[in-house]
Amino acid sequence: MAIDLLSPAFRAEFQFAAMAFAGGLALERLRPAHARQSWRALGFNLVVAVIFLYLTMLIVPPLAELFEPVAKRHSLAIPIRFPDGVAGSILQTIAFFVVFDFFFYWWHRAQHRFRWLWVQHKFHHQDRFVNVTTVHRYHFSEEAFRVFVIVVPMAVLFDFKPPTVAWIWTAFLLWGYWIHMNLKVGLGPLGRWLSGPQFHRYHHTPEYGNVNFAAIFPLWDRLFGTYHHPERGVFPQVTGVRDASDGNTLYEATLYPFVEWGRAIRRAFSRRRVAGAAVD
Ligand SMILES: [Zn+2]
Ligand SMILES: [Zn+2]
């Protein structure tokens, strides 16, 4: 099947990202949490955003389609219909995203816990200048994995229509832009219930690191003991990964996790061979 990389769907995705980046970067100038941002790092993130968006748009929809019949067969079919009146829509949205964030939380926590997942997620964390563009600074394979750990379980639980999927995806994207912004905004007590740029900045600082895994609702961090409430007026200045480079190479943006997985597989095979030889 020929894939038209300049089809309206691809173009719409890029336009959306470009607008969000332009708006986000303009807002960040008003009240930056971290004043000395690097133009070079920003340029790198923009290149990665193009790679990330192209590849995820190529990989994720067919993958999700492939598993849709399986999810449908086992679906509990809790109906989700947007819009459904104001109160209904608000309640459904909250319920849906609380569950969505539960899966996101555990997946994200596993990415920090297991080395073979960390090699994939590390690239996102190597950014020393977290800002709105960090939202697409992911290794593209993360999105493919998310199909299995978030999209499929959500499809098993809920019954939603394709327009709803687009709506959900857009809302989640917008939220990603918001929490990565280099913005000096504290949410005060509301921060215990909703995530924001300060909450997520703590996740990106090596000083704390393994805290604040939730994307939307800090509730999950509070329940499972990984919550760090942002101190009033404190916006960690150092982000990145301790004892690692800034990861700003195309190798790290594309091949790195595959090379690491290949090495891990080879190591496992050679260990088995050594164990086998010892038995002989
Ligand atoms: Zn993380
Ligand atoms: Zn992040």
Image: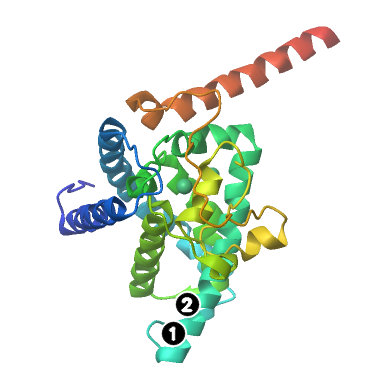
Q: Residue at x 26, y 40 (%)?
A: 46
Say which element carries label 1.
Answer: helix
Query: At which x and y percent is residue 190?
Result: 54, 70
Count residues near mark 1 (Cα–Cα under 10 Å), then give few for <14, some for 14-19, many for 20+.
some
Residue 89 badge: 1
Residue 91 x %, y % = 51, 83
- Assign a secondary structure to mark 2: helix
Looking at the picture, does residue 103 appear above or below residue 261?
below
In the image: residue 52, left or right of residue 63: left
Q: Position of residue 234 (x, y in %)?
A: 52, 50
Residue 13 in sight from this viewpoint: yes
Q: Residue at x 60, y 37 (%)?
A: 207
Q: Residue 93: which numbered mark, if any?
A: 2
Residue 160 higher or lower than 277, as above or below: below
For ligand 1, which image quadrant applies?
top right
175 w.r.t. 246: above or below: below
Quadrant of the rendered image containing residue 99: bottom right
Quick one: which residue is furthest to the right in this view?
A: 279
Could you give the CA–CA distance between mark 2 and mark 1, rounded to whole angstroms?
Answer: 6 Å
Q: Is disc 2 in contact with disc 1, using a CB cutoff of under 8 Å?
A: yes
Residue furthest front in the image: 233
Q: Nearer the viewer, residue 111 or 262?
A: 111
Q: Identify the residue at horizontal 27%, vertical 44% (top origin).
A: 54
Look at label 2 and name its amino acid.
Thr
Question: 10 Å neighbourhood of mark 2: few (<14), some, or many (≥20)?
Answer: some
Does any portion of residue 144 appear in the rendered image? no
Q: Residue 86 in the image: x percent, y percent?
A: 41, 90
Residue depicted at 44% across the width and 75% down the height:
160
Q: Nearer the viewer, residue 3 or 202?
A: 202
